[in-house]
Amino acid sequence: MARTTPTYTPIGKYAAGVILSGLLLFSDINYGTFSPIRGLLKSSVIYSKLAAGKLVERAQVSIALFQNNKNLILINDQLRERILKMEASLFLDRQLRAVDNNLVNLSNHLNDLKGGYTAQIFEIADFDLKNYQCCSFHNLYLKKPEEITVNKHSPVASDKAFVGQTLRVDLDIIKVILFSDINHVLPVKSKDLYCNARGTGEPLFISCRMELNNSRYIQLGDIIYTSGLGGIFPKDSPIGVISSIKNIGSSENEILIKLDSNPLDQTFFGIISKQ
């Protein structure tokens, strides 16, 4: 049940409280009774402020480091992008220089071959690499501008030597059969000895057969030239060297010839034709 009248507190208690407070105050003023407690409180406050300051300082340092790392990452990305652009530019520049050198060398070689011929330069369109590396049929394809006429069975040269001849022209594509194709036959000579060299179906190699009496006059490393017979290739143009001589019967030797020019290394080819 709630009380309806205030509780009476004797005045003695108030007096005792006042006296006790006075004694405590007097003791603290004269003897510093509560100084350690006040010092502890002040120290706690100061320590709390210092700790809070340290936390704020560390937070600021962390934020600054994070911002610096972010800036460094951004700078690194920018530098990486610039380096990639420079590398790409240098690569393209090297490729352009290589193409220019290829064209210059090819042009010079064609000028040496021309004689009574005209020469035109064509860019490669495709290479039947799968068959070239594994099988017997070796062909490449050149781009033909519309305004240029190309005849079948015209000699095809790289910047080093002849590599084959045109087989047919389909719209803007020229099909070229290479010397190493098993269906190709090339009249060649070494010194005063003549033979018809056939493609072996192996990249960069052709071969021909000679009688033992004739083949004894040749040796490894001898240069092989076009003979001019057959009416397609100019006479006395070097195409390769003898790499092996193998006896295949009682009266014949097989002469293996390694070709000078690797068509895989070329971007442009020249086609020459009689004027």
Image (tube, rainbow, N blue to C red):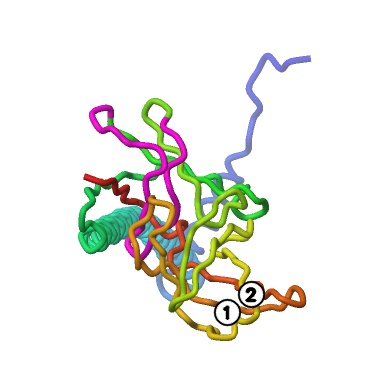
| Percent coordinates x, y for residue 215 in the rendering | 59, 80
Q: Position of residue 86 (x, y in %)?
A: 27, 58
Q: Residues within 10 Å of mark 1 (few under 14, many from 20)?
A: few
* Residue 51 in view in this figure: yes
Mark 2 residue type:
Glu
Residue 221 drawn at (x, y percent): 50, 83
**Numbered tag placed on residue 214 in the rendering:** 1
Q: Which residues are magenta?
A: 146-169
Asked if marks 2 and 1 touch (Cβ < 8 Å), the reply is yes
Q: Quadrant of residue 248?
A: bottom right
Q: Residue at x 49, y 67 (%)?
A: 259
Q: Measuring from the top left, give residue 274's x and y in whole percent.
A: 26, 46
Asked if residue 152 lies in the magenta stretch, the reply is yes
For residue 97, the mark is none
What amino acid does circle 1 point to?
A: Asn
Who is closer to the viewer here, 130 or 208? 208
Residue lying at the far right of the rendered structure: 1
Please identify the quarter of the rendering in which residue 216 is found: bottom right
Q: Quadrant of residue 134?
A: bottom right
**In front of the other: 86 or 224:** 224
Residue at image coords 50%, 52%: 178
Q: Is 70 part of what is drawn in magenta?
A: no
Residue in the picture at 41% in, 32% down: 169
Q: Nearer the viewer, residue 266 or 233?
A: 233
- Looking at the rendered structure, the secondary structure element under dot 2 is strand
Q: Is residue 93 visible?
A: no
Q: CA distance from mark 2 to mark 1?
A: 5 Å
Would residue 239 appear left or right of 87 to someone viewing this image? Answer: right
Q: Which residue is mark 2?
A: 211
Residue at position x 22%, y 48% in the image: 118
